[in-house]
Amino acid sequence: MKKIFIASITLLTLLAAIVIFSIKTNAQSAGGLDITVSPPVIELNVKPGDKIKEKFRIRNNLSQSVNLSVSTLKLVANSTNGEPVPANPGPDDEFISWVTFDSPNFNALPKEWIDVSFTIEIPQSAAFGYYYVFRIAEKSDQQFKGVGAEVKGEILIPTLLNVKKEGVKTEAQVLEFKTNSFISEYLPVEFTARIANKGNVHIRPRGNIFIRGTNQKEIGILEINPTQISVLPDGTRSFSASWNDGFLVKEPVMEDNKVKVDAKGNPITHIVVNWNKFTSFRFGPYTASLLMVFDDGKRDVTLEGSTKFWIIPYGPLILIGISLIALFIIVKFVLKGYIRRELKRQKNLR
């Protein structure tokens, strides 16, 4: 009877651990022009009075040639969320005139790379950081499609110019470090760190998130901003990391290398059971510590934060609880019948 009871509990626990649920996310689509640029971000270090000549490369991925133009916008921090966004220069943005292109209009042949050369003349009065966007588009009006390496549509190349001069201020602050939810039913747990740049030059914070359990033993280390995305002066940026190292993990359902969606267009998810991580069943309270660093030109400056969160797989726990109650009732009924029969048998023997 004892062996049957233990086996029943084990079976019910495993069945409860494989319950499937679903969540919502969004899909993305892309447009017409198809070109690749290298590098996706340009960063230059200069001194006042310098005149530099640089270049980037463009590849036309289409099967026909295309006439392109390149122009200069300014890169600013979005007033709402601090993310870098392109903006049209104003009359006071003299630094835009420092940039000239050898050939602002050119023909890109199909399946070939082409060099785009530009010159920047830095005046003696220049100091600290200047931020550009090189805009590459067909010779027609189009909406911005994206920033970076390979995008369908218009291409925007962020260009960061550092003018070395006394008076540079590098200062940053962790505005927020949190999880997507204080209580999560399953992994992954999503972390977000919001970093504010309080200086006059851009910074590139990078680092790790250290996760500890109730015994303060380190059970996970995550990278945050490993590609060293920049934060502009007076701007903020949110950096994210995901913890998915465990026995039960919620993942999107894939079909033909695409996320499967329901009738409303919302992605469908399911619970993945990683049997090779059976000992990494995540349950209870956890503490996450953030440690990021950025270079102030002399040394690494640290940024720190901490947050607490819980993982409670309440779906399986409720199912296990109901199953145990049902099992208790069944065992009680069986034992009651067994005892009744034994008493009757003993009575007949007398």
Image (tube, rainbow, N blue to C red):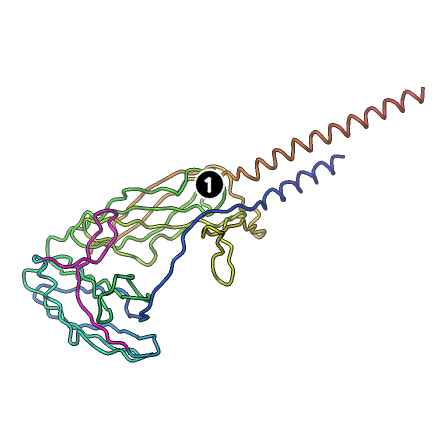
Q: Quadrant of the C terminus?
A: top right
Q: Relative to 238, does residue 283 appear above or below in the rendering?
A: above
Taking 70 as reference, is 250 above or below it? above
Percent x, y for residue 114? Answer: 26, 78
Badge 1: residue crowd in 10 Å (few <14, some 14–19, many ≥20): some
Residue numbers of the magenta segment: 66-90
Magenta includes 88? yes
Among the 4 quarters of the image, the one containing residue 166:
bottom left
Residue that appears at 25% across and 62% down: 143
The dominant secondary structure in magenta is strand
The spot of residue 81 in percent (x, y) is: 26, 47
Residue 267 in the image: state x and y as whole percent.
Answer: 47, 52
Horizontal relation, residue 102 to residue 272: left or right: left
Q: Whole-percent x and y of residue 255?
A: 52, 60
116 falls in the magenta region: no
Q: Is residue 286 above or below residue 36?
A: above
Q: Residue furthest front?
A: 263
Name the residue: 81% across, 28% down: 338
Amino acid type at mark 1: Ser
Nearest the viewer among 209 and 123 is: 123
Q: Name the residue nearer the viewer: 114 or 348.
A: 114
Residue at 17 percent of width and 76 percent of height: 103
Q: Disc 1 marks which residue?
A: 184
Q: Quadrant of residue 34?
A: bottom left
Residue name at image x 33 percent, y 50 percent: 239
Label 1: which secondary element: strand
Q: Quadrant of the N terminus?
A: top right
